[in-house]
Amino acid sequence: MKWRLGRPSVSSCWQEVEARTTVRLELLAGSVRVFEGKWYEVERSFYLLEIASSCTSLSFTGAKNPGQLKVTVKTVNRWTGGPSVSLGTASLTSNRSAVLDYRVTTKLPTTVSRMLPGAGIYSVLHTDYDTFAVLWSCSDLAIMHADLVWVLGRERELPVWARAEVYNRLTELNIDSDRLTLSRNKDCPTF
């Protein structure tokens, strides 16, 4: 995670997301369905709320609205071995880019559910749809700014060519790939 102290404006994350997003998940001809299917977390930047997570997988399936995806996030607690499943919905924020507003499914009021771990704005920075995807998110928290990166793969490991392409794209976007750590994906159970 990258932290900066200062006085960020509320819109600075939105401006960063829009500026870094070049991928287009078109609403036409299949909508966001090109992103459907199972993805595995391969690498990520440090995120305190995920410190005990391992074997993370994300399944994206179509929703009633063509600009939405249902999301199932499965993880295993690396200390207890206990599984965890989180459900939510990712909605395109516009048809101009691949910026997704992810909300955790809950019965809590909207104002509370927006603050749940994992909820937020995510940008698909780069993907080939078949092998890898790079997600990025940032948050302005009063005087602090944080941005996070996740590298996803259709398999738990990326081929060398895909990893090179991901790292090249991160360099182009001025995102330091040195802050990424390999996700724990050994001996993952099926659930």
Image (spheres, rainbow, N blue to C red):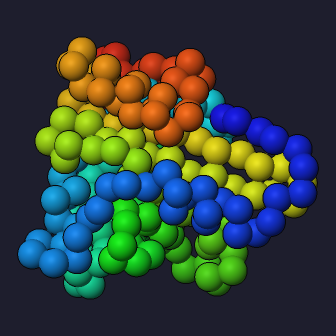
Residue at horizontal 16%, vertical 78%? 28
On screen, residue 9 versus residue 75, left or right, reads right
**Residue 117 appears in the figure:** no
Hey, which quadrant is residue 184 in on the image? Answer: top left
Residue at horizontal 69%, vertical 80%? 111
Most foreground residue, 179 or 106: 179
Most foreground residue, 11 or 35: 11
Q: Position of residue 25 (x, y in %)?
A: 26, 64
**Which residue appears farthest toward the left when viewing the image?**
29
For the C terminus, give its image quadrant.
top left
On screen, residue 93 versus residue 144, left or right, reads left
76 up-or-down from 97: above or below:
above
On screen, residue 55 versus residue 9, left or right, reads left
Hey, which quadrant is residue 34 in on the image? Answer: bottom left
Most foreground residue, 22 or 145: 22
**Residue 147 appears in the figure:** yes
Most foreground residue, 109 or 11: 11
Q: Position of residue 66 (x, y in %)?
A: 23, 80
Q: How many marks?
A: 0
Residue at horizontal 19%, vertical 47%? 129
113 up-or-down from 36: above or below:
below
For the N terminus, give its image quadrant.
top right
Q: Position of residue 171 (x, y in %)?
A: 48, 28
Q: Position of residue 73 (x, y in %)?
A: 39, 50
Hey, which quadrant is residue 52 in on the image? Answer: top right
